[in-house]
Amino acid sequence: MISNLKQTWFFNVRGDVLAGLVVALALIPEAIAFSIIAGVDPKIGLYASFSMAVVIAFAGGRPGMISAATGAMALLMVTLVKEHGLQYLLAATLLCGVFQIIIGYLKLGQLMRFVSRSVVTGFVNALAILIFMAQLPELTNVTWHVYAMTAAGLGIIYLLPLVPRIGKLLPSPLVCIVGLTIVAMVFNIDIRTVGDMGELPDTLPVFLWPDVPLNLETFAIIFPYSLSLAVVGLLESMMTATIVDDLTDTKSDKNRECKGQGVANIATGLLGGMAGCAMIGQSVINVKSGGRGRLSTLVAGVVLLILVVFLGPWVSQIPMAALVAVMIMVSIGTFSWSSIRDVRTLPVSSSLVTFATVAVVVYTHNLAWGVLVGVLLSALFFANKVGQLLYIGSEKTTDGTREYQVVGQVFFTSAEQFVAAFDFKEVTERVRIDLSRAHFWDITAISALDKVVLTFKREGTEVDIIGLNEASATLVDRFAVHNDPKAVEKLMGH
């Protein structure tokens, strides 16, 4: 028990605590911004960020990953809040959590293996672009002080780690935020601060049940929103977990993460917060700042609540320019620059999948659509590639039989090539089709085999099929019709 606690919670105390402090500070303006997007009070997003981070620290399957209120989820809530109000959003958050727990127990987290590396790269690049674009409003139509503060913040972030000893003691993003806040307060610089984003809550969250009627009408209203929130939330969480896996060279439990996200969203709904999920930007900040264990996530959530409730007057003085500098650092660190550098050496299909994923995400601001397009394109390119790996040769045996050897995979993309390889005009009494090195995958392939056999029979040629493996034979037995005497007559009728 004690050994397990040390391995998961207390193996990196200093790094986790300092990283958690940085993440807590960076979470505040984003939680407020996402609340505004969803059309709810800022405290709804802040309470959500607190509860999501604290619960997922215990229940999640990916240590060091940060979960909170997110923009992807906020966009899905707009219509529900506008048409039905906050209470229905809280109910939808609870149902979202239930769906995610069910998905976790069904072990659907394993579906992440169908997401190719090209899609993950496109997801990462798109998110880096969106993070950078989200900072642009803070850098337009502003005074020179903002640019100076942002530049100074970036200087601290990138140069401080180069300073001997001191650079390794404190995470540079934390020094950036604290240092620029002190400068802004001492010199009374008139620039936009966290307090200008919205009013911070002054009370702790309390347990409450959504004030909605428990009937089928309510269920019909929240069901589509809850399902969308559950799917998008898990999709973003699984992608973020994969990225953190790569950054830390460790593995995560995807199915446990699904269940953990569900538990966290149920707790969030009961504490008056909006639905949330894993945040790639904050997770990258956490890892880059030295956070590795569950303690970093817990510290981020607890410190966030302490900051906004008990230290609100001080937190409200943090200049947005400092946080913009941190987020620019995140976008630069998140973007996969090697995907551009290696574009000439990578397969064209991989580059197209990456580009399509980026384009759709940036255009729609919806990560789910981008990943869906990327996965579909990957599947199409893969099917086309495998479909071309089909060879059919033939030879005349000593007894006058024409023998065809089929090597490869026969399914919907290669079925036409399979049929075209046979010479139906050749005059021969018997044809033997050797399928010992082939595999038939679907009913399209079985239909192609039917067409070949029936066409030969129509020409008066006997056909022998040999070498079918067990899986292919099962499909042939269930769906093939070439052994039906009436099948030839139907084919001749056409």
Image (cartoon, rainbow, N blue to C red):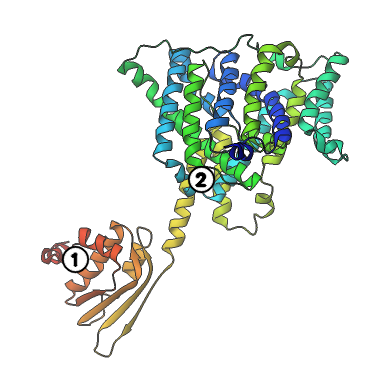
Which residue is the site of mark 2? 374
Q: Write the residue at 77% across / 28% down.
A: 174
Image: 120 above or below 94: below
Residue 231 position, x and y percent, is 45, 33
Residue that lies at the very extreme toward the front in this rendered image:
2
Q: Is residue 53 left or right of residue 475?
A: right
Residue placed most toward the observer, 25 or 382: 25
Q: Is residue 394 above or below residue 298?
A: below
Residue named by callout 1 = 482
Q: Earlier in the sequence, mark 1 or mark 2?
A: 2
Going by the picture, which residue comes out furthest to the bottom?
398
Q: Quick check: 14 above or below 110?
A: above
Left of 32 or right of it: where is 479?
left
Give coordinates of residue 113: x percent, y percent.
48, 49
Picture coordinates of residue 321, whole percent (x, y): 77, 24
Measure the C-alpha gap from mark 1 to mark 2.
39 Å
Q: Amino acid at mark 2?
A: Gly
